Amino acid sequence: MTELARQFAGEGPLAELLPGFRPRPGQIELAERITACLDQGRDLVAEAATGTGKTLAYLLPVLAREGRSIISTGTLNLQDQLFNRDLPLALKASGVEKRVALLKGRANYLCPQRLQTHLDEQSDRDSELAAELREVARWARHSERGEISEIESISARSPVWPLVTSTQDNCLGSDCPMLKDCPLAHARRKAQDADIVVVNHPLLFADMALKHTGFGEVLPGADAVIIDEAHQVPETAMRFFSRGVSAWQVKELARDSLAACGQAAGSLQLLRVPIQALRDELDQCVSACVDLPPRGDHARLTHLQSRFESLAQRLAELKGALDPVAEQTREMGNCADRAGLLLDGLRAFMTGEEGTVRWFTNRRGRFSLQITPLDIAGPLTALREHNPATWIMTSATLAVARRFDHFTRRLGLDDADEVIIASPFDYANQTRLWLPTGLPEPRDPGFGPQLLEQVMPLLRANGGRAFLLFTAHRALNQAAEWLRAHSDFHLLVQEEAPRQVLLQRFLDTPRSLLLGAASFWEGVDVPGPALSLVIIDKLPFASPDDPVLEATMKAVREAGESPFSQVQLPQAVLALKQGVGRLIRQADDFGVLVIGDPRLKSKSYGRLFLNSLPPMTPVDSGAEAAAFLRQKHEIGGER
């Protein structure tokens, strides 16, 4: 028996440390494949179904080898869980000593320089904001890590946070007078010295491209990069490679330029007029954008071309005024650099570039203009060549019909090894799948109410304890309205409270139904009988009005391929697999999955979706599904 297999064995160190630990052949197989690829320097793309134990399957091989490794995951919560729970467990099981570090994006750390700057300007601020600034200052005197999440008394939506954290735009980097007190600088230095660094996907891509952050890079010197939740990588990479400008960035530039005048003699006289002119023009642009849709492509903005040209002119005038005084202070030089970058981004958006799509988002006039490359395989391959390492990409949802083409082709991973690890869960006995019959097409106005009528007996039989997942917020809100009128369940509706608050209420409140859209389809973990019913209204095809998706589909069509089969279908299959994955989270879970979309049976592509699901036992009626749930709850003493 190899040392790796011994660690996963029934009498190994993991069994001693984890009550109820059971050896899983899939976990051992994945760990051995990862070990082989790390030893051979070969990339690996691995789908490891829920229950495999993929975290330990990559941690133990990483800890067993020499060299430096980066581990990236999808969210801050998963990052904290990995660093604070899984990594210490793996270190104890392996018996090795490694220097480890946790590194987050700059928005998670206090910027002492910006805090001090805005404390000095308190007289200009409203009393509530000034009080919050003082509260942050009191906390900063005692915090060891400087992570703003430690301050629970201030709302995450408070306007104080942009004042006390930095962005890539306004960070002074190595020129900062308070660099020695900077929590981000401390965290980066620790990461540079560590054997294992835990990051998240946006930070990973920022570091890959060697952005001008003012700090040394983390990736150089790493010979292994492990990417968990790898299904998020294509979208993360596409967002990262985008360029653009937002109303918020322009507003911050004007504010910081004015603040910088306090330390640069004679600058206020030069800058007052161009700063005010920029602010006035920005107000005009925001007013002109108020009636725009929440998002759209560049064609929807043609009537505003002259407005944005005027904004570019005001930016150019401010940059021209900043340049002569840029060397007086670090802050003034930073503002001059930012003005140039924003001007370049705005001009690039207005002129366009081949192989890109121009699009915008809008919220009450606060616009963001983006130019996004349609092909990310090329730049991603170039960045990986600049940072040579072995890449291990794993997720519970990567394959479509047991193939990875849609994923590897998009990321330029054509030579990677591939493996699919099946779940150890007994889906045939633990679950049932019901596809209601007689429902109209999903776009029919009667679809939602008729689906809810059919599942109501099932909801009652289960005593609530259900997630209702929707592909659109409009359908979610209509369902909430219908359920309030036709049932007495305790409803928890997305956006009525933060996600973690809703989840805790779901656990604590009997007869609860949680209604969620996109953000509840993944990254939500409710093990045990508290969640034993998941209802999905429709197949999760991406909205056709997404400008990036629309441009991608057009490019695929012009290349002579089918945008439906090459783009829309794979994305929808993976999204459905994520939603289905909410139901069974541990070995003794049970439950029923309901998918209301009749296209699963009426369309030829429905078979692809069904074949991508876990091997659940189908039932012909809601009554049969309800009987299964009653039996399982009675066995578990839940009723």
Image (tube, grey):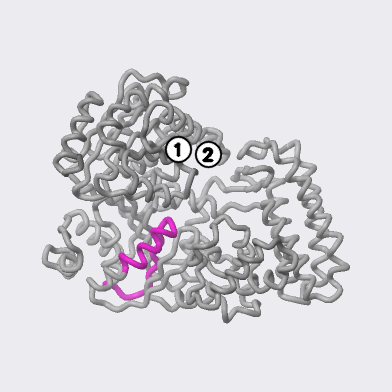
Label 2 to label 1, Cα distance in Å?
A: 8 Å
Q: What's the residue at 50%, 75% (across, down)?
A: 143
**Neighbour tally class for label 1: few under 14, some 14-19, many 20 plus, Cα within 10 Å:** some
Of 546 and 238, nearer the camera is: 546
> Please, what secondary structure does the residue beneath circle 2 have?
helix
Kind of residue sitting beneath label 2: Leu
Query: In which quadrant of the rendered view does residue 97 lie?
Result: bottom left
Helix, strand or loop status at disc 1: helix
Q: Is residue 275 left or right of residue 73?
A: right
Could you tell me which residue is drawn at 11 percent across and 66 percent down?
Answer: 11
Give the extent of the magenta segment.
64-87
How many other residues sit within 10 Å of disc 2, few (<14), some (14-19) or many (≥20)?
Answer: some
Q: Are marks 2 and 1 in contact (CB under 8 Å)?
A: yes
The amino acid type found where label 1 is placed reads Val
Taking 5 as reference, is 262 above or below it?
A: below
Q: Is residue 226 magenta?
A: no
User: Which quadrant is home to the N terminus?
Assistant: bottom left
Residue 77 is one of the magenta-drawn residues: yes
Circle number at residue 567: 1
Measured as percent of width and height from the top left, residue 236 is found at 49, 52
Residue designated by label 2? 549
